[in-house]
Image: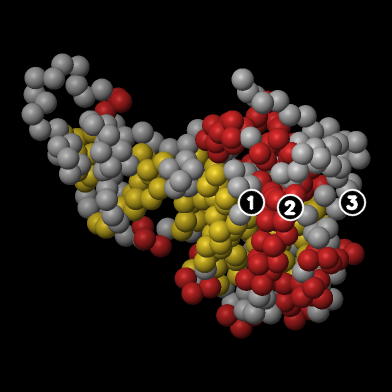
Amino acid sequence: MASKFHIHSDISKAETLPSSFYKSQDIFDEVKENIFLKSWQWLGDNSELKLTNSIKPLTLLDGFLTEPILLTRDQKGSINCMTNVCTHRGHILALGPGKSKNLTCAYHGRSFDLKGNFKSMPEFEKTKNFPRPCDNLYQFPLAEWGPFLFAGLNPVFDFKEVLNPISERIGFLPLDQFTFDSTLSKDYLIQAHWALYCDNYLEGFHIPFVHEGLNKVLDYGSYTTELHKYSNLQIGYSDEANETFDLPKDHIDYGKNVAAYYYWVFPNMMFNFYPWGLSVNIVKPIDINRTKVSFLTYIYDHTKLHKGAGNDIDKVEREDEFIVENESKGIQSSFYQSGRFSPIREQGVHHFQRLIAKFLNQ
């Protein structure tokens, strides 16, 4: 039986998700089916798909969804997203990235074009009612945002609902000029439930208590949160103009010293824009008490790197990791059930938990 949760729409009256949400395997499985399968996920950038006839296989949230995905750029230059599972006997179709005009299964030779359409199959001359539409590769909805790619397995909302409010703020940035830096990118293993990590990200309430260095850079008193339908934005301001964005005159924040735009996208994606570039954080559930968080660094202006709010991200992450892991231990207590929200500082957490309740109650 599906679990039901209620988070009051009035944050001043609302209680947080109960501790059972973070401790139940059944609920964890429901989250996979009702949230992650019905939302959008990060696929990376298009750097390996610059040329036509390129293919790039990947596994979406390996160890959780573990869905084999295949990206292709066909002869017309379009990027396509499809299942990487052959429609004959379920063999993985593309085993590695590369260049090819067709997709041919290594098991029995079934062939597809780069849009996923069935082309040929040996020894099937006597098969009746063949091929059928189901012999084509299943297509997943694909969204492109500059060089960045996203897919939904069975999304219930349009990704434009996410991108439109983000583009209003950072549309002036040339995302196609952002360059991935593997030396500044890494994975962190967190001994905690994935949603606890998101809860922590979604409020600046803890900054003065947990992040001494970051608190010196940001003006905590002016820290703000803006809510959108499937995303929200936290804006960090600074008193030091050399650590802030050079905003165009027609920008909504022109004249303000913005040190960082922290965007969260439901359910598990974070896009942290700094004057030097972008830190993408993807929260990847493993099991109830283990989460992998991938930090991916895209640099735009090297001269501003290691300055301001975007400085020493690893230290900030370690501080967050310590807090979240101790919260995970505490939430196992038989004497903790749920808490309350700060209407001033925890609008983002309230928004996130209301979305969780909405998706699980459908």
Neighbour tally class for label 1: few under 14, some 14-19, many 20 plus, Cα within 10 Å: many
Q: Does residue 54 show up?
A: no
Q: Residue at x 14, y 33 (%)?
A: 121
In the picture provided, is 147 more to the left or to the right than 171?
left
Whole-percent x and y of residue 97? Answer: 30, 56
Q: Amino acid at mark 2?
A: Glu
| Residue that label 2 marks | 327
Q: Residue at x 56, y 33 (%)?
A: 29
Work out how far the residue at label 3 is from the one at label 1, CA to CA, in angstroms. 26 Å
**Badge count:** 3
Neighbour tally class for label 2: few under 14, some 14-19, many 20 plus, Cα within 10 Å: some
**Closer to us: mark 2 or mark 3?**
2
Residue lying farthest top?
128
In the picture provided, is 282 more to the left or to the right than 315?
left
Whichever of callouts 2 and 3 sits on the residue coming sooner in the sequence is: 2
Residue 311 quadrant: bottom right
**Closer to us: mark 3 or mark 1?**
1
Whichever of callouts 2 and 1 sits on the residue coming sooner in the sequence is: 1
Quadrant in which the C terminus is drawn = top right
- Name the colour scheme: secondary structure
SS at mark 2? helix
In the picture provided, is 346 more to the left or to the right than 29?
right
Q: Amino acid at mark 3?
A: Ile
Circle number at residue 281: none
| Residue that label 3 marks | 344
Neighbour tally class for label 3: few under 14, some 14-19, many 20 plus, Cα within 10 Å: few
SS at mark 1? loop
Q: Residue at x 75, y 43 (%)?
A: 333
Whole-percent x and y of residue 240? Answer: 81, 79
| Residue that label 1 marks | 192
